[in-house]
Image (cartoon, rainbow, N blue to C red):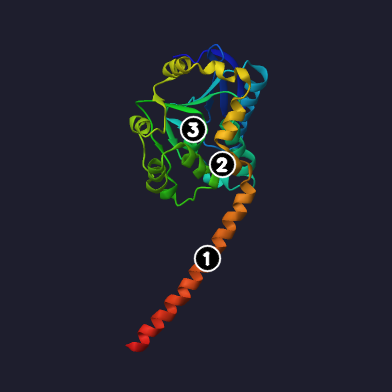
């Protein structure tokens, strides 16, 4: 199905782009393509932010759908090396996530392919998620990569998923296909753009921004995650202190074990 009338394009670096179209009145599709797999790097995040700013400022408020121009991937998540650049989380990624989470229009992630780790987190920042029924997995694979979740990353799943699904995602790294994701309320439906447009019509979503309170309502709904997104520096310091405390506890345990071993050896 066509994504509709072209509105504008925002470049992503030198090779990618965000194409914004309108398939129906007050419905906007933000389709991003940054080969090979839509990694969440700085120019990618900033291009989407700019597209969202343009829509909010220059167009009648309605519903925003994000999706990928790359069939196989909605996104393959973070580039871990790039993510270690100073300020990336607080000033780039978390800025994008906060923008989506409290955007003053209903937002829908149309997940057309794989959504791994940071990509699934990005989709969870949307109000609704519709997934391709034939292609793609959703998962958090940090437990396999040996990468801890920052507070905002974990919080969004704690707020939007059941405790059992939260545990399965985080501690098991399970890969969810579309119907399994739907069964576990990770997504709200399956299909493509046509199904998304029907979903929008059934819920009358294009009229929801009319009173101007959608963003305020979402900020209060998700204030735990918003707080973490806005205060990453504070949370990083808290985590550093926690790590120091764990190191001290580990050193104390080692001393006790050595003392115990010495006593055992003395009795032999």
The alpha-carbon separation of the residues under discs 1 and 3 comes to 35 Å
Vertical relation: 26 (above or below) 218: above
Element at badge 2? helix
Residue 68, image x and y in percent? 49, 26
Res. 36 mark: none
- Residue furthest right in the image: 57
Q: Where does the C terminus fall, quadrant-wise?
A: bottom left
The reply to whether the C-beta atoms of the residues labelled 1 and 3 are less than 8 Å apart is no
Q: Earlier in the sequence, mark 1 or mark 3?
A: 3
Residue tagged by mark 3? 123
Q: Is residue 115 left or right of residue 63?
A: left
Pointer 3 local density, CA inside 10 Å: few below 14, some 14–19, many at least 20: many
Q: Nearer the viewer, residue 19 or 191?
A: 191
Residue tagged by mark 2? 224
Residue tagged by mark 1? 247
Residue 241, image x and y in percent? 59, 59
The reply to whether the C-beta atoms of the residues labelled 2 and 1 are less than 8 Å apart is no
Q: Quadrant of residue 105?
A: top right
Q: Earlier in the sequence, mark 2 or mark 1?
A: 2
Pointer 2 local density, CA inside 10 Å: few below 14, some 14–19, many at least 20: some
């Amino acid at each position: 199905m066509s994504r509709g009338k072209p509105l504008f394009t925002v470049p992503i670096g030198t090779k990618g782009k965000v194409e914004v179209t309108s398939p129906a009145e007050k419905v906007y599709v933000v389709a991003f393509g940054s080969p090979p797999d839509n990694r969440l790097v700085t120019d990618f995040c900033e291009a989407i932010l700019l597209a969202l700013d343009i829509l909010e400022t220059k167009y009648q408020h309605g519903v925003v759908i994000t999706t990928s121009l790359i069939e196989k991937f909605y996104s393959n998540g973070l580039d871990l090396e790039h993510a270690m650049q100073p300020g990336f989380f607080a000033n780039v990624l978390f800025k994008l996530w906060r923008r989506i989470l409290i955007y003053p229009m209903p937002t829908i992630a149309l997940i057309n392919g794989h959504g791994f780790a940071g990509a699934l987190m990005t989709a969870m920042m949307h109000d609704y998620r519709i997934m391709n029924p034939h292609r793609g997995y959703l998962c958090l694979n940090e437990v396999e990569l040996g990468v801890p979740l920052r507070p905002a990353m974990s919080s969004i799943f704690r707020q939007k998923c059941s405790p059992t699904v939260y545990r399965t995602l985080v501690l098991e790294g399970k890969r969810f296909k579309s119907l399994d994701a739907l069964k576990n309320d990770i997504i709200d439906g399956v299909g493509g753009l046509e199904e998304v447009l029907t979903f929008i019509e059934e819920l009358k979503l294009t009229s929801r921004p009319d009173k101007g309170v959608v963003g305020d309502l979402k900020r209060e709904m998700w204030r735990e995650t918003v707080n973490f997104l806005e205060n990453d520096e504070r949370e990083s310091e808290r985590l550093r202190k926690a790590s120091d405390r764990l190191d001290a506890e580990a050193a104390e345990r080692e001393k006790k074990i050595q003392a115990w071993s010495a006593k055992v050896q003395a009795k032999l």
